[in-house]
Image (cartoon, rainbow, N blue to C red):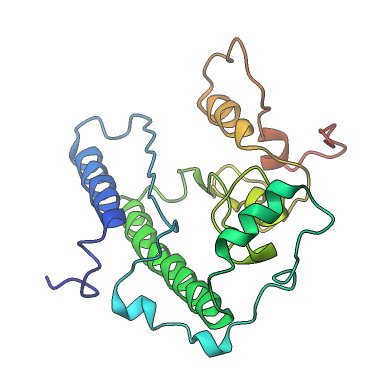
Amino acid sequence: GEPIVKGYESHQDYKVIKCAVDKLNEIKNDPDHNNPWCLYVGVHGPHAAFVIPEKYANMYNPEDIELPPNYRDEMEDKPYYYRRMRKRWSQLSENEVKESIAYYYGYCTMLDDMLGEVLNKIEEMGEMDNTLIIFLSDHGEMLGSHGLYYKGVMPFEEGYRIPLVLKWAKGIKNPGREIDQLISIMDIAPTIIDVAGAERLSKQGGRSLMPFILDEQDISWRDA
């Protein structure tokens, strides 16, 4: 059929999505398809540069975008390196910053559509309820916060706080909960190993999230 959006299927991230969907079709058609499987879908975005098809680039109006509340932070109370990094981006006008934020939002929406194709395929396979789906990122995007872009050594929340969403109909007790404990990317591997019933890693910096999945009470957890 025709592509959903002009430029959509030629985007670098869609190449990853297509590989994932093709692999799921392969799993679906495998005589032993009931065997456990694990699929990692690692798209590049929403990463700079925010180059996306026109539909998504025009989806959000820059005039409606508000600048981050700390956009005008001149870093006077922070190390010189922070100020030097901020100066790098001072060439952008406020309108250009708003435009970049609009493109970033469009990029996020495009990835929602793309990842939706993977979820639709899992649903088509009849495996949605039995599949643990973990959605997360490796880092945030400053996106004009403190006048900065990308990531870096600056330990601001916008760069260090990332999304983490778990869906597993047959495994998560009392779904729909939000937790505010300090979770780390290091916790993902121990969680997957725990879910799979595999042998614990000999060395690991993280901890399994299974107590949260099972909604256990009075969980002793890190606070730093």
**Quick one: quadrant of the N terminus?**
bottom left
Q: Is residue 124 visible?
A: no
Residue displayed at 48% across by 87% down: 61
**Closer to us: 108 or 189:** 108
Q: Is residue 182 above or below residue 147?
A: above
Farthest residue, direction right: 218
Residue 26 screen position, x and y as percent: 20, 40
Residue 110, quarter of picture: bottom left
**Closer to us: 213 or 1:** 1
**Closer to us: 191 or 142:** 142
Residue 111, quarter of picture: bottom left
Q: Is residue 183 above or below residue 121?
A: above
Horizontal relation, residue 20 to residue 68: left or right:
left
Residue 222 screen position, x and y as percent: 81, 33
Residue displayed at 38% across by 77% down: 57
Residue 58, quarter of picture: bottom left
Horizontal relation, residue 82 to residue 64: left or right:
right
Residue displayed at 20% across by 61% down: 10
